[in-house]
Image (tube, grey):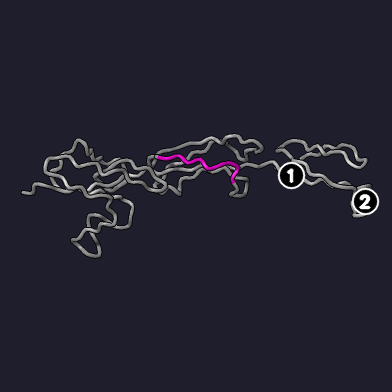
């Protein structure tokens, strides 16, 4: 009877399979293998280390490939008495974007939240940012976590303060009647105060049409 065995630690996300090679039946395709640990019969496999993957958090080694609860391989308490293959479980990230309305221009850095169980429901509330106003029916958004981390997004939209050029004319708008101009910053949902200039008194203007 064999007096030593192997524990194969499969990354469980590449295209190939560490158990069977479809192109060469009966041979193992090792391109998906993180580590292979040799173990004497009845002993505990050494720690293979922790793999990493963009967009995911490693969540342990399991006896089944499926990314569900399954049965976890309790390495430190499992004597090895036969060859084993165990599979990495991955919990995806989700990301929260804060964009200018109608664009993908950021008003703040993305918020990335790691290590979420597939099928779990997560929620976020749109924060306030200086110089911006939230746009939407609700500040509260929820999503159900999917396995592909790229599908896990929450997006909040905002409008932002803007600069306006104020031009002064005498009597009517024409080059001959041009008196000068200035730039003012319009704050979201606030009255723009136009500086007086060239005999024109101070005027208060509401935000221009189309500016939210």
Residue depicted at x 29% and y 54%: 32
* Mark 1 → mark 2, Cα distance in angstroms: 24 Å
| Nearer to us in this view, 67 or 41 | 41
Residue depicted at x 81% and y 39%: 205
Image coordinates for residue 119, horizontal then vertical, percent: 39, 41
For the residue carrying disc 2, how many other residues have a C-alpha within 10 Å: few (<14), some (14-19), or many (20+)?
few
The quarter of the image holding the C terminus is top right
Label 1 element class: strand
Residue 169 left/right relative to 147: right
> Magenta residues?
106-114
Residue 56 falls in image quadrant: top left
Report the residue that reaches farthest toward the left: 1
Q: According to the image, label 1 marks what residue?
A: 163
Image coordinates for residue 211, horizontal then vertical, percent: 72, 44
Residue 8 left/right relative to 188: left
Going from N to C along the chain, the mark reached first, 1 or 2, is 1
Residue depicted at x 62% and y 41%: 158
Q: According to the image, label 2 marks what residue?
A: 177
Residue 173 left/right relative to 77: right
Label 2 element class: helix
């Amino acid at each position: 009877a064999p007096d030593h065995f192997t524990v194969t630690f499969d990354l469980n996300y590449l295209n190939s399979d560490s158990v069977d090679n479809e192109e060469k039946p009966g041979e193992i395709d090792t391109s998906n293998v993180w580590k292979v640990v040799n173990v004497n019969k009845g002993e505990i496999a050494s720690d293979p280390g922790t793999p990493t993957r963009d967009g995911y958090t490693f969540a342990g080694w399991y006896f089944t490939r499926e990314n569900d609860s399954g049965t976890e391989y309790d390495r430190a308490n499992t004597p090895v008495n036969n060859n084993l293959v165990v599979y990495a479980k991955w919990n995806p990230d989700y990301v929260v974007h804060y964009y200018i309305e109608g664009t993908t221009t950021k008003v703040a850095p993305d918020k990335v939240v790691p290590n979420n169980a597939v099928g779990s429901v997560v929620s976020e509330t749109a924060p306030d940012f200086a110089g911006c106003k939230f746009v939407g029916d609700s500040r509260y958004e929820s999503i159900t976590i999917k396995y592909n981390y790229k599908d896990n997004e929450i997006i909040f939209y905002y409008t932002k303060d803007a600069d306006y050029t104020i031009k002064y004319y005498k009597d009517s708008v024409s080059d001959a009647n041009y008196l000068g101009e200035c730039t003012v910053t319009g704050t979201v949902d606030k009255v723009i105060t136009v500086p007086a200039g060239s005999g024109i008194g101070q005027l208060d203007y509401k935000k221009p049409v189309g500016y939210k």
